[in-house]
Image (cartoon, rainbow, N blue to C red):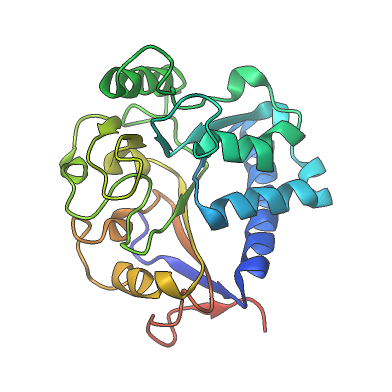
Amino acid sequence: MTAVPGVVVHADARLLAAAAAARLATGLVDAIAAQGTAHLALTGGGIGTATLAALAATPARDAVDWRALHVWWSDERFLPSGDPERNETQARAALLDRVPLDPARVHPIPASDDGADVDAAAAAYAEELLAATGPGDRGGVPAFDILLLGVGPDAHVASLFPEHPALYETERTVIGVRGAPKPPPVRISLSMPAIRQAQAVWLLAAGPEKAAAVALALSTAGEVAVPAAGARGQRHTLWLLDRAAAADIPRGLARPASP
């Protein structure tokens, strides 16, 4: 597992989203060419959704064999299907409804109106993930080729918030989260062990309100206090930032990507 993450800094949020979209297209093309299929886990939030919209707007999207792609989510707000606050709803509007995906390979986290409570819905998603694993996969999830994560101002990732009991989960791959400090309070999230089964974890952050969280996560902080510090991939961990979000990280740690 990678010990030292890569850090790439772009001039502003717009350039960050465009560059992350181009990087994502290339990563998906390479994974599908090598394996015949790929698994992508999406995130919500402003910069995550902007990245999907940027990919939809670029001709590079046509290089991806979308029907070979499995789409998952790292977390979801436990709200009714189609609610505008759901990560699924935002991702469909930004990208998924604009590319020729195989509907059977799009795996949304269950909604609150699907007839199950949050724990049963989390267990159902865990079963869906397990069913998609191959012989070389470990930890009860497919080895996501790329897993995207936004980073909150409090350094939360997915729906794993600082000091929350969900961070102590070691057995389950998907957990129902109650009492989240950010509304809505009920959510479903991959656990940290499941996140760390991904081949590549990309953490995206933009804006000055993220600077302190990014700096803490790239320091020696522990993941219970700073969940973003615990998010890392089996082969690669990459932080994609704009200048404002990177303002407090040590000089020399980041590679500037644009003037």
Where residue 173 sits, quadrant-wise, is: top left
The residue sitting at 60% across, 22% down in the picture is 105
Q: Position of residue 124 (x, y in %)?
A: 36, 17
Q: Report if residue 109 is visible in the image.
A: yes
Depth check, front residue: 245 or 118: 118
Where residue 35 sits, quadrant-wise, is: top right
The residue sitting at 51% across, 39% down in the picture is 87
Tell me: residue 77, above or below residue 1. Answer: above
The residue sitting at 50% across, 46% down in the picture is 44
Query: Quadrant where the C terminus lies?
Result: bottom right
Q: Position of residue 68 (x, y in %)?
A: 67, 28
Depth check, front residue: 72 or 187: 187
The answer to whether residue 164 is left or right of residue 52 is: left
Q: Position of residue 249 (x, y in %)?
A: 39, 80
- Please identify the residue farthest to the top as the structure is shown: 115
The answer to whether residue 16 is left or right of residue 44 is: right
Q: Position of residue 189 (x, y in %)?
A: 34, 36
The residue sitting at 48% across, 78% down in the picture is 254
The answer to whether residue 212 is left or right of residue 143 is: left
Q: Report if residue 65 is visible in the image.
A: no
User: How many numbered dots are placed on residues in this image?
Assistant: 0
Tell me: residue 173, above or below residue 216. Answer: above
Tell me: residue 20, above or below residue 193. Answer: below
- Please identify the residue farthest to the bottom as the structure is shown: 251
